[in-house]
């Protein structure tokens, strides 16, 4: 019996033009770095190296520590030298990235349906961002941080999607079995990999990402409206 529902954020609860998001993200980060007197080209390269390091994290470090260890190898600058600049960016210029996203008016309704039925909710967004950035994107979606019992961020995670260990860590933290969980996401490779460990998947097709052009008929799938209908048919578990 499903007791916990995991939601992806970007492209799922928060519709997004991924290419536009990345363009605006790096454009405004560069501006913040230059305004704070940092060598932007070197640091931008280090950010991308750090992201790759987190995706390959073997679990020996948090993603946060993994990022900054990689970052320092490239720049010679550690967390203490740059963290305040990144926080300033997320608190300010990051809002200029918001036009790459849209509000889906059905997202709050979907969360309400799940909560009313008694399900535990997890925001299973790929934990390559710090908490400050993830919470801001939750607000962009017009949702509340308090809606979720767990939000994966780079501070509290040791793995990333599409690794199965990312989902194993969530289940361990919540003391849940795979068959007690449902994963809802828009990325075939990153989100539906949860099915390999026995988690039921629902593939949201509104902002579908299917890099390998896989046959998606093997998964529960559909639009946001169809997701809502699917959730309404699920039992109350109060």
Image (spheres, grey):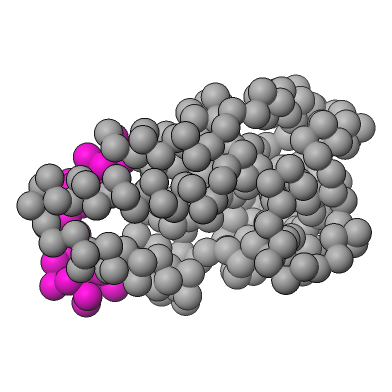
Q: Can you name the residue that lies furthest to the left here?
A: 37
111 or 11, nearer to the observer: 11
- Disc count in the image? 0
155 or 30, nearer to the observer: 30
At 22% from the left and 77% from the top, the residue drawn is: 73
Residue 95 in view of the camera? yes
Secondary structure that dominates the magenta span: helix
**Quarter containing the C terminus:** top right
In the image, residue 148 sits, relative to residue 73, either above or below, namely: above
At 24% from the left and 52% from the top, the residue drawn is: 30
Q: Horizontal placement of 213 versus 154: left or right?
A: right
61 or 23, nearer to the observer: 23
Residue 197 in view of the camera? no
x and y, in percent, of residue 189 in the image: 69, 65
At 14% from the left and 51% from the top, the residue drawn is: 34
Q: Horizontal placement of 52 versus 179: left or right?
A: left
- Name the quadrant containing residue 227: top right
x and y, in percent, of residue 235 in the image: 89, 33
Q: Is residue 41 magenta?
A: no
Magenta residue span: 65-91
Q: Is residue 74 magenta?
A: yes
- Name the quadrant containing residue 66: bottom left
40 or 74, nearer to the observer: 40
x and y, in percent, of residue 43 in the image: 22, 64
In the image, residue 148 sits, relative to residue 1, either above or below, namely: above
At 72% from the left and 62% from the top, the residue drawn is: 210
Q: Horizontal placement of 190 versus 173: left or right?
A: right
x and y, in percent, of residue 4 in the image: 72, 43
Q: Horizontal placement of 154 versus 76: left or right?
A: right
């Amino acid at each position: 019996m499903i007791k916990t529902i995991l939601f992806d954020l970007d492209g799922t609860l928060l519709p997004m033009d991924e290419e536009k998001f990345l363009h605006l993200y790096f454009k405004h980060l560069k501006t913040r770095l230059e305004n704070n007197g940092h060598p932007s080209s070197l640091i931008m390269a280090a950010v991308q190296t750090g992201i790759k390091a987190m995706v390959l994290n073997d679990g020996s470090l948090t993603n946060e520590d993994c990022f900054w260890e990689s970052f320092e190898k490239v720049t010679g600058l550690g967390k203490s030298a740059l963290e305040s600049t990144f926080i300033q960016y997320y608190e300010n210029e990051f809002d200029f990235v918001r036009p790459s996203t849209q509000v889906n008016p059905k997202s709050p309704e979907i969360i309400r349906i799940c909560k009313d039925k008694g399900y535990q909710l997890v925001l299973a967004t790929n934990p390559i961002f710090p908490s400050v950035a993830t919470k801001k994107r939750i607000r962009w979606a017009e949702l509340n941080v308090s809606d979720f019992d767990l939000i994966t961020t780079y501070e509290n995670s040791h793995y990333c999607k599409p690794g199965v260990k990312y989902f194993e860590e969530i289940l361990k933290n919540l003391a849940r079995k795979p068959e007690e969980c449902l994963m809802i996401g828009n990325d075939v490779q990153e989100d539906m990999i949860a099915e390999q460990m026995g988690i039921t998947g629902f593939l949201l097709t509104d902002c579908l990402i299917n890099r390998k052009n896989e046959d998606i008929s093997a998964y529960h799938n559909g639009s946001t409206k169809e997701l809502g209908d699917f959730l309404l048919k699920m039992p109350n578990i109060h």
